[in-house]
Image (tube, rainbow, N blue to C red):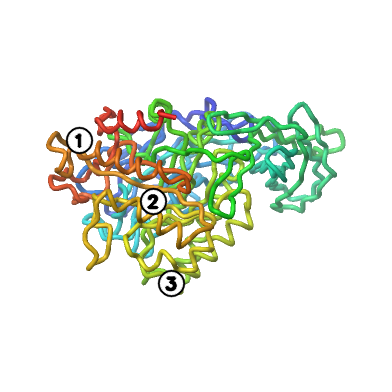
Amino acid sequence: MPEAAPPRGRPAVQEGSPTRRLLGGTWYFRLDDANAGLAGRYMAQTSLAGWRPITLPFDWNARERTSNRSSVGWFRRELDAPRAPKGTRWVVRFEGAGHFSTVYLNGRRIATHAGNYLPFEAELPELRRGRNRLVVRISSLRSSNDLSHWRKASFNGFGNGGWWNFGGIHREVSIRPVRGVDIERVQAVPRLACPACAARVQVHLGLHNPTPRKVRSQITLRVAGRRIRLAPRYLAAGQRRELVTRFTIRKPKRWDIRRGNLYGLLAEARVPGEGKRARPLTARYRTSFGVRDLRKRADGTVLINGAARRLRGVSVHEDDPLVGSAWRAPQRASFLRRVDDLGANVVRAHYPLDPALLEALDRRGVAVWDAAPVYQVQNDRWALPAVRRNAVAVNREMVRRDRGHPSVIAWSIANELPDPVTPQQASFMRGAAAAVRRLDSTRLVAIDRVARVGAAEDSNPVLRTFDALGVNEYFGWYRGAFPPIPETTSADLGPYLDTLHRQQPRAALFVTEFGAEANRDGPVEEKGTFAFQERFMREHLQAIDTRPFVNGAMVWNVRDFRVIPNWAGGNPIPDPPYNHKGLLDLAGKPKPAYDEVKRIFTSR
């Protein structure tokens, strides 16, 4: 029987309760390709036969290159409960796992969650003194109704998509004690009447009373040298409640591009202890926020603190050749060094980033185009109400997690949905945009679309639903037009952007993807060569730079990554499963296009 160990260490994610502890140390893992673990009662096993030791985060297919394995994996942690006063409750938090997660404590199921990139928590109602067994069943088995990996795969059904179907616990796991009430989240969202005005800061506090009695909670905020005491709030037994309060900062220091000015915020919730002489019980939650004014003019120009910014940056997939999507501090640090070296000031992915990475971008003053993992869902799926509901729900989860981060400038509700836009697809667009705005109206609400010369849908009135349009353009790499329009070249980009601006004159336009694969030497005219990629980047950035109505541009991608086992992607000499559009190769070495992009990014 393995030795049980208590949680130790501080999480990399800074936001949260000061009493959190990292649930690291030795975990145990076993792969379950046959999906036999439920019948075999893996959640209750005491022996280590068939299990192997690992540390988190961990993807079981991190180094695969052939099968894009959709499967089931089991994770197990022998946990010695920390010493704590009587009546202490415990909550475990997963920052990212999946795709489908089922959590067991001492053989009993206590929580389920769907989605790789957003957090979930589970109360540990039977955590006892001494040995406990925490088990997590992770399934990366997808279906035709999945929001990103709905294509059929050769191994276990579905699971192919626009990036590798990693399975595992991708991000850190922490545990915290709860006595009295629990502060589950705190987010501060500043609003300014004008760029130079005072900041009216709206604070969202998520409270939970896990006790069997009604409690009176006294909330205090500590921020900018001030102590703000709120009127007492009552919570019924078991109640969850979101409180919203506001305070003003008269002369705030501004968060801005490459100026990551942040304020610290400590929230405290105090309730009476149980018993006549018991001391009050206090829950605490630390977070940070930045004050910046973001608005869009009628001509589509985006202003940050009253000024138009030249946003140039990169997109990223959390894909490392050794650890997959289970990035740790070295992978995050390597990515941030490249962002700094390139002179990039905006970052994008196909899903919400690791919160530790998002916090680092806050501190650097780097903007984030935050995107829900809703990717290329086909129109027959949009006809299903459950698919539309799930896609709106994942957008809500994204906003609820990230609205306290000043780096986030846009909520992108979906990426590369098909043409034509059906009534059901339009229903999702409107519903998701409305749901996002109800939670946060201080950012741009966006959608990212494939650019095609002559596309009728570019003038569709439903696109007026959005503050911003992301343009994924590959003119001169992919065909870039429906027949009978001829195949495009880089020269088509400028006229396309001019036309789109005329069709959607109020929309804030961003080029959210552009790139070309490069995996070899060769002539500049040959697709797939380093010379072709370098020229492609230069020509596209020149077209973008001469059009001030384009607010930003993000290279696809900062580094080569895995897609699907038979990926070709327009490269005459492909190297599946890799998409070689990265400015860095698989080993992290810069290609010639890296220096060209750096030169252009840093030229002003």
The quadrant of the image that shows the C terminus is top left
| Disc 3 residue type (three-letter) | Leu
The quadrant of the image that shows the N terminus is top left
Picture coordinates of residue 274, whole percent (x, y)? 80, 39
Residues at marks 3 and 1 touching, judged by CB atoms closer than 8 Å: no
| Disc 2 residue type (three-letter) | Arg
Q: Could you say which quadrant of the image residue 576 lies in?
A: top left
Residue 41 image label: 2
Residue tagged 3: 384
Picture coordinates of residue 5, whole percent (x, y)? 49, 28
Residues at marks 2 and 1 touching, judged by CB atoms closer than 8 Å: no
The answer to whether one can see residue 398 in this image is no
Q: Which mark is first along the chain, 2 or 3?
A: 2
| Residue nearest the observer in this picture, 14 or 58 | 14
Q: Is residue 143 left or right of residue 304?
A: left
| Disc 1 residue type (three-letter) | Phe
What is the C-alpha distance between the residues marked 3 and 1?
44 Å
